[in-house]
Image (tube, grey):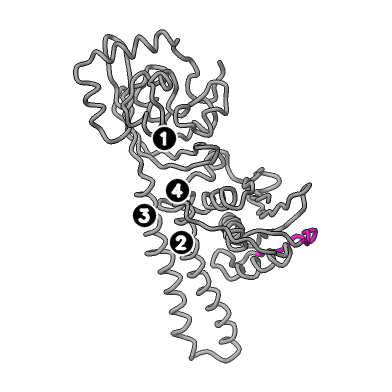
Amino acid sequence: METKFASAERSSSDKITQSNLSLDKITYLNDIFSSLSFIFCILNEHRQIVYTNDVLMKTLEIENVDQILGKRFGEAINCLFAVEEPGGCGTSEHCRYCGAVNAMLNCQTAGVKTTSECRVRRIVNGIEDFLEVEVTATPLVHENSSYTIFSLIDITDRKRMAIIEKIFFHDILNTASGLQGFFEIFNSIDEEEQRSFIQIGASLSQQIIDEIGMQRLLTQAENHELVVCTQAIDSLTFIQQIADDLQFLEEAKGKKIVISEDSFTVTFESDPVLLRRVLNNMVKNALEASIVGQTVTIAVNQVDEHLKFTVHNPRFIPREIEMQVFMRSFSTKGTQRGLGTYSMKILGERYLGGTVNFTTSETAGTTFFIIL
């Protein structure tokens, strides 16, 4: 069977059963595994589960171990990419960037304990869910057969706090410091410059409010506490206001934000606060990706019975980055970042009921969109 990364070969169900019975003979193994508060399982040479503790079974809400034996880990937890290729977990192009698969492979080939962080996009009850985990793969030889002890610890909350601290202690503090600097020199400039400073100062204040509001919304969304409040919105007025509000961003210096001339005007129902957050993040991403002199274009068009909002910039996203967009905490801007595209997915799909995605090419540039 073909694969785009790890081997697609699998052991037969009889061999899986034999491995499970063999491992079950290890003295105290079940007692040790059951005493652990985090997920532990043992994988065979083809990365299939042949032994597990009850934590994984409870997490997956299964009662019989036979429901999980023989599956690969991504298949067991319903990873979004585990069904992308016929070969299953580990065989898609996305799997090249999976911390779990890479930890398993390194453990098998180098024969050493390997620990890595892994971002997971999975489907739970028909809804896309995001996890950040720390995985450890440790080699095990038993009865002349090679296995991998695989453990998983959920670090989603830890990563969330690190990002929030980064945003509040660094990003917002920097913006507030810039705002303070404006007021310190306000009385030393003439009246015409003061009018310009007031406009910029108001924009900086709004950025602080927006950043705090974004974190509050995202926390509510992840805790399933967010309430959607729909109202009538004029499509063209809505995107024009977004362009006007974001033109004073630091990332917008030397760049243009324009509205496409063929944008569609219509009144529709949605939550303006959530939709604004989604589109704001699309525009900010586009501005950060663009260079001085380039233009970011916002548009809204009708596609069948739907509205499609798009944000385009002329830059191209390399393939290795394209494969990881929308992953929680993934960012090209360094560690403790990476909520922008993730929040687009959470707010745009889970709460607005839309479809959020993007296209990118060297000739056409990059376009993020939400279809409502």
Q: Nearer the viewer, mark 1 or mark 3?
A: 3
Of labels 2 and 1, earlier in sequence is 1
Of labels 3 and 2, earlier in sequence is 3
Q: Which residue is depicted at the point 46% across and 70% down?
A: 175
Look at the picture and state if 201 lies above or below 305.
below
Q: Is residue 262 magenta?
A: yes
Q: Nearer the viewer, mark 3 or mark 4?
A: 3
**Helix, strand or loop for the magenta stretch, by majority:** loop
Per the image, the residue denoted by label 2 is: 216
Look at the picture and state if 24 lies above or below 348.
above
Left or right: 214 as drawn, with respect to 266: left
**Label 3 to label 2, Cα distance in Å?**
13 Å
Percent of width and height locating residue 145: 31, 11
Q: Which residue is depicted at the point 57% across and 58% down?
A: 228
SS state under label 2: helix
Per the image, the residue denoted by label 3 is: 161
**Label 4 to label 1, Cα distance in Å?**
13 Å
Q: Nearer the viewer, mark 2 or mark 4?
A: 2
The mark total stands at 4
Per the image, the residue denoted by label 1 is: 99
Pick the residue in front: 233 or 203: 233
Left or right: 240 as drawn, with respect to 141: right
- Read off the magenta span: 256-266
**Label 1 to label 3, Cα distance in Å?**
21 Å
**Label 2 to label 1, Cα distance in Å?**
29 Å
SS state under label 3: helix
Of labels 4 and 1, earlier in sequence is 1
Q: Could you say which quadrant of the image residue 325 lies in?
A: top right
Q: Which residue is depicted at the point 43% across and 42% down?
A: 131
Q: Which mark is residue 329?
A: 4
